Image (spheres, rainbow, N blue to C red):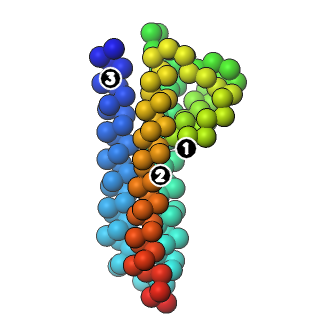
Amino acid sequence: MLKEFILNGSLIALVVVIHYEFLFRITNLMPRLPIKHRFRIVLGVLAALTAHSLEVWIFGTAYFFMHNASNWGSLLGNHDGSLLSAVYFSFTAYTTLGLGDIEPHGAIRFLAGLESLTGFVLITWTASFLYLEMTRYWDKD
């Protein structure tokens, strides 16, 4: 149980730090860009999507290795054991979509639940960030 706690906590810490860095850097970059203010929002959305995709891939890679290692559980159902299949599952967990065509079993289930919670928080954080950026730049052009 300790190894699951350490792995899950490390993954969550990693993606939160990545997300923070993306938002922090885009906040610092946006005012200096020589583009129309409204296009800065588009840049913010693209940066946020990039951050979320990177975070999903990090979780997906963890699922892939956990699935292929012993004593971590498995992904069953419409899962072919590939990295892309694990990343697909990660996208459904991160976005809280939860299609159910791939099911986690064993210790890997805890990561799936924590990824859903983390994804929900990070997506909400992004929405708040983009709202604040829109209020800053929306009427400037």
Please name the residue shown 64% across and 26% down the image: 102
Which image quarter is the N terminus in? top left
Instruction: Indicate the position of residue 104 as horizontal and vertical percent values.
Output: 56, 21
- Would you name the residue on which mark 3 appears? 5
Alpha carbons under labels 2 and 1: distance apart: 8 Å
Alpha carbons under labels 2 and 3: distance apart: 23 Å
The numbered mark at residue 95 is 1
- Residue 79 visible: yes
- Residue 33 visible: no
* Amino acid tagged 2: Ile
The numbered mark at residue 117 is none
Q: Is residue 116 above or below residue 125?
A: above
Q: Secondary structure at mark 2?
A: helix
Tell me whether the residue at label 2 lies in contact with that at label 1, contact meaning CB atoms closer than 8 angstroms. Answer: yes
Q: Is residue 80 left or right of residue 95?
A: right
Alpha carbons under labels 1 and 3: distance apart: 22 Å
Q: Which of 35 and 127 lies nearest the eye of the viewer?
A: 127
Crowding at dot 2, Cα within 10 Å, few <14 / some 14-19 / many 20+, comes out as some
Q: Is residue 101 left or right of residue 133?
A: right
Instruction: Indicate the position of residue 18 as horizontal and vertical percent values.
Output: 36, 48
Instruction: Indicate the position of residue 32 as horizontal and vertical percent values.
Output: 35, 79
- Would you name the residue on which mark 2 appears? 123
Mark sitting earlier along the chain (2/1): 1
